[in-house]
Image (cartoon, grey):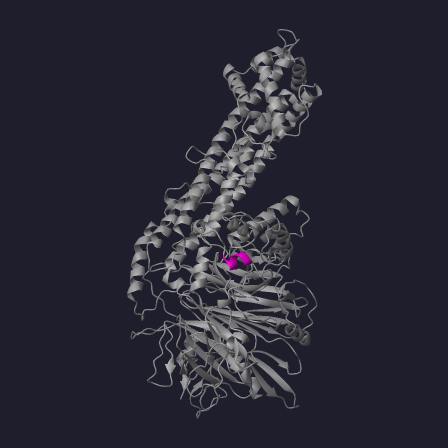
Amino acid sequence: MAEESFEAEQAAGNFTPIQSRKLRRTTLIPCSSLCPSMDLIALGTGSSAYKFDYLAEGISPSKRKNNNNTTSDSSEGQCGSTSVDFAENIAIHRIVSWQRLLSLTPEQLTSSKFNDDDDEFDSSDNIIFRENKEWEYAEDGGGPLFQRLVRSSGDEMMDDETNNTNSNVETSLQSAKGATFICWSPDGRCVAIGLVDGGVLIHDVEPEATDDETAEASGHHALHIINPPPPQQRLAKNLLPFDDTESHHQESDKVEEHPATPEKAGPSRNNKVAFSPRVTRSMASRKEDTKLSSIQQQTIDENTDTAFQPTSAVIGMSWNRVSPPHSSWSLEKEEWEMKETWTYSSQLIDRGRYFLPADCYNQPKSNDMGRVDGSFSPLAHLNVLCVATSRDLHWYLQGRYRIGSIPHGFDFGGHNTKIDLVCSPDLTSLLVVSKQPKLAKGSRGATLYTTPLLGERRFDMQIFSALYRSIFSRLRDIREGLRSSTDSWRSALRPLDTKFQGLFKLLCNYNVAQPNDSVVDCAAAIRLELLRCILSGRSSVSGDASNALDQFFTRPQMHDQLFQREIKSVEASVASMEAKLRSNILAPIRALVYETGELYGIARSRDCDASSSTLLDPDEALRLYSSARILFLAIERCLAHVVEARGRLHDLLAWIRGTASQVRARGTATDSIQRQNARNRRVPDGVIRRVSNFLSTSMISALRDSDDVVFEQRHLAECVIGVPLSDYFSDCVPTENAAPLSSKMPGIRCTLKSALQSTFQICAVLFDKPRDVFTETLDRLDVLFETPHSTIAAHSRIGAGHCVDKNGAFAPKLTQPNDNASARHWMIIVRSVESNFIEVIAIPGNSLPKFYLQAGLALPDNHTVRNIQFYGDSGNSSLSPNLDIDAMTNEGRQSLGLIVERKEVLSDGSLELHEELWLFSYDEVSFKKFDFGPNSKKAFSIAATEFSRNQCVHVRTSTTTTEDDDNVLVPKCRHICTHKAFIVQEQSELNLCGSRGTAAVLSFGASTSLDILDLEEDEEDDTSSASGDESCFEE
């Protein structure tokens, strides 16, 4: 009865319920997340009957029965394969009204733009699909296209063996569809969805629909799709962790610590990680030395069967925005100078929208993922999306620009093993924690990656990542515009092609022309006979040609009303095509020229600073700007030819109509209606002169006439008028076959597609260099645990400075008053060790930490920790962040949340298990300081402390606390569920949101239950009562 009253008191006294949902027992929720700035929750639902398997050697999606067989999962982990549950549907709800704002079906949970299971997926879509994939891989610094353009500036091009690679890419991308992880953007406006195929979908949150049908009709599409990055070759031996052979030649890394430190030290680790080798160098440096390094050559010549397969499923994500400094910090001189420089330079950035045409920026939302969204600006605070797969880690600046990729080195086995990614507030450090239970002594449980680049070059990274997103968006818009313009031009000329093909067939039947498959030769024969008809009319010299033309003009298809309707249709289609060229191609190219010029100016100014590394090569940026200008000249020339083609079409069609009326009027009475129509439709003499003029002159083309050029893309009608615009939309041609843009630019590729390809290649190489710089500045520090653990969680905190006012920051208390432990940022790791002990570890988030802090928490004997989550408000999660450079930040509420399993022996001797939610503050916990040894730059071990209840802080509920207990933490508690000990079921899952003061608890039993709780509603009442304060010690 006492236990029942205790549970009733917990259920009624703490954590007001907001929402409670009961789901089917077979319903699986593998991923969920609470929004940091709005009362929203994102849920990924699926069925527990299926799971996703991925092997160590590659991706192998499959759906198979998962009857919660623990033995089977364990055996899979031992054999090197891992399984992960995935969501088949994603839904975002308001947590109070449960209104659905977004719903995604399984077909939408893929990084592939086309659905290969669709019956309408034809061969043309397959060509576009493969071309898109080539561009995406090249943009991301890999793939066959990128390797070709790296080798193209050397001695040779890639051979045809990449064709097999393309088929492998296409086959491997046809993988399972589903989501494995959900992460919110720092401002809560977007949600990032990690996919089974290794990609990430970024969606905005808008109340567009309340059901699936309405959502599909509303056209809610992803803002951006992050495709699976190219796999990274790990060939740099000096960056690999030491193996057993090398460890014999290295000095063992013994960690010098206090007496509590164990004698055995962890294995030796390198302070660098196994980074991917450079795939490219700047073209400027290659001019001097075109010989590739051995690593580059080995990467390019690698067996292509598995070189470009996508990475495996996403198992961890974190999206963080740089946090302003705390008010207690004392800024260094360099920091003040950087702030002052940005204050003035920011006024000169992103000025293009003030003078460029509106259509360069105001693009409507569509299915195209390349549209530039207005929220992505160089003035926006830098944020980083960190993504972890089963093999690699990836950094994405502003959620778009992949700045770095490395292998994390964790070997996973079992079921649903994930990774915690914790980024420091200044984005310079990333703590990677494996959620897999560690049972081996001295095993690596976490790794701290640090780089000063994101701190020292923060504002440069903001500009470069924004320009990366914008420039590649322009290039994609231009490519899509070329496709649509090509289709419009082809459809506009289709009626005329049919008519001229009939005319050429008549000429062949009358032996005036010889059958020929060449479009150019056919057009030449037609042009010659039309010119003869204008100059000599019907004569006995060319009787057969005259008969053929008379038959052509008197065909039923040349009826005046039908032909007049076709004329209007053709002219309207050509005008529409010109409008598409101006809006979909010319407008993005104008913005591209401006942005590349701005990028060149920034790269040149940063290159003058000798104290910092060069992120962008100024010579390469100049080449990009020059290529963008060539692309602009090419579209201007194309538009001039479009205007010329419109005029020629108008004159030619008017002459054909008038001539057809004259042919029909022959042999009729003088006052007949045919004669009257012929007189009314007679064209002016100027029209006849213009038609005869362009029929007697050579064609206007973007390509030089050569026997080596195949004009398969040309249409008969455009060759007849002498303006083959299809040449501008043709594939790349040899430089010697391209007509020069001007006398000052001989041999420049002036077709639109060739100029676009050249611009894209230079852009891909230019933005690949910051990845090399990021890799070179990245350091690695392994964290080894001497004590095994079953549950682990990590969190980041803002440290307090040397000023007196330290409110809103983490200032750890030490057991030794003389010790000094201060840092601007802290990485907090909490582990459940032994049976009922919790270990709290605080590591400075600096580039090279020299110490760590350790504390122990003890739970009652019959309690076991099943889940750990941090309940923290960084003070930086807001819909409208403060963009002022002088802004300060303070942390909000900070606590630790636990799912605790309490054992109770019933009167009949059976064992009953109660799962409870505990929440308490840990800021008042006293830590013990441990200094690193001299060789701890590579790795350090967490001391195997002998946990004693006399040395630990006791965490007890109010009913189990006595007046004699000292050094006790009293948490807030709430009962979750109860089940018998012999019933095997999944552990409850916890999701906390400190910025909104809410918690989501998933419990599994007879049904799956989702409970959303308000953790702060009764805060005032609790603070007024001394016994109920969650953050106080009882002494």
Q: Can residue 187 be seen in this view?
A: no
43 vs 585, left or right, is: right
Q: Quadrant of the N terminus?
A: bottom right
Q: Is residue 108 above or below residue 263?
A: above
Q: Which of 374 and 218 is in front in this view?
A: 374
Q: Nearer the viewer, residue 61 or 943?
A: 943
Residue drawn at x 46%, y 49% is 763
Say if residue 209 shows up in the picture. yes
Residue at x-position 63% and y-position 66%: 55
**In front of the other: 912 or 536:** 536
Residue 1015, how many percent across, how many down? Answer: 47, 73
- Left or right? Give the position of 808 relative to 548: left
Q: Is residue 261 left or right of residue 554?
A: left
* Picture layout, residue 147 above or below residue 777: above
Give the x, y percent position of residue 791: 54, 78
Question: For residue 715, which quarter of the picture?
Answer: top right
Looking at this view, name the residue that lies furthest to the bottom. Answer: 964
Reply yes or no: does residue 879 show up in magenta: no
Which quadrant of the rendered structure holds the C terminus?
bottom left
Q: Is the magenta stretch mostly helix, strand or loop?
A: helix
Magenta stretch: give its range: 293-298
Res. 199 image quadrant: bottom right
The stretch drawn in magenta includes residue 297? yes
Give the x, y percent position of residue 634.
Answer: 47, 36
Residue 547's place in the image compared with 443, above or below, is: above
